[in-house]
Amino acid sequence: EVQLVQSGAEVKKAGESLKISCKGSGYSFTSYWIGWVRQMPGKGLEWMAIIYPDDSDTRYSPSFQGQVTISADKSTSTAYLQWSSLKASDTAVYFCTRRSSGYYVFDYWGQGALVTVTS
Amino acid sequence: EIVLTQSPGTLSLSPGERATLSCRASRSVSSTYLAWYQQKPGQAPRLLIYGASGRATGIPDRFSGSGSGTDFTLTISRLQPEDFALYYCQQYGSSQYTFGQGTKLEIK
């Protein structure tokens, strides 16, 4: 069974750093792109970035380029999203998601991680 | 960047009725790369439709997708109580992925 299990909720202060994780299982982790999607409170879905774990090839949305860093560790089948200096506007639920091969859609999703940034 | 505009913003219908949700792209999208998702409160999105008209695994046949170019449609033929949720379209192009702003399907 394909599963993406994310790290838990975080409460941080503005200016702090943060790295959240997403562990894949039940499939070949290095064969599928993993993306991150933001959902701000009461708002819609926003694609942030995507990585191919086999060679760490990455793509970023222009809206998030330079704001976050995506990475992956093949040895532990885990993808990461990190911030060097959080802002209150980073408060959101962050989902990791697997991109299917062929149709470029997101077929499996993590449970989401709520990040709350206080000012 | 391709912008996806979904309409209506909110759709109020009764169980058993037919729902038609629209997704319009700012420029032509390959049908291969157009998808629809359902999201319920407190849950992750679930893939419903891929390639504009293909049903994802386990999705009931009352859900269907159609369209091409800039206009795509998700149809739910006979609404069940569990279908009342948020729906998003999503496209891929030029190494970028974008979502529509969503349509809320609520019980009338």
Image: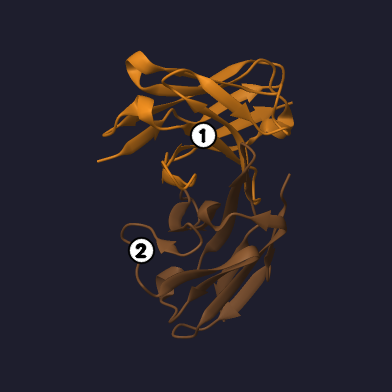
Chain colours: A orange, B brown
Name which residue lies at 68% across and 57% down: B28
Residue bearing mark 2: B59
Residue B65 position within the rendered picture, expressed as x and y whole percent measured from the top left: 49, 68
Marks 1 and 2: in contact by CB < 8 Å?
no
Q: What residue do we see at 35% from left, 63% from top?
A: B59
- Callout 2: chain: B
Q: Residues within 10 Å of mark 2 (few under 14, many from 20)?
A: some
**Amino acid at circle 2:** Ile
Question: Residue beneath label 1, please?
Answer: A35
Q: Residue at x 70, y 26 (%)?
A: A65
Q: Please say if B18 is above or below A25.
A: below
Residue B15 locus on image (x, y percent): 46, 82
Q: Quadrant of residue B63?
A: bottom left
Give the SS element for disc 2: loop
Same-chain check, marks 2 and 1 = no
In the visual, does A30 lie left or right of A59? left
Residue A6 occupies quadrant: top left
Residue A18 drawn at (x, y percent): 58, 18
- The residue lying at 48 percent from left, 57 percent from top is B51
Rendering coords of residue B31 (x, y %):
55, 58
Q: Quadrant of residue B103?
A: bottom right
Front-most of A10 and A40?
A: A40
Q: CA distance from mark 2 to mark 1?
A: 23 Å
* Image: A7 above or below B43: above
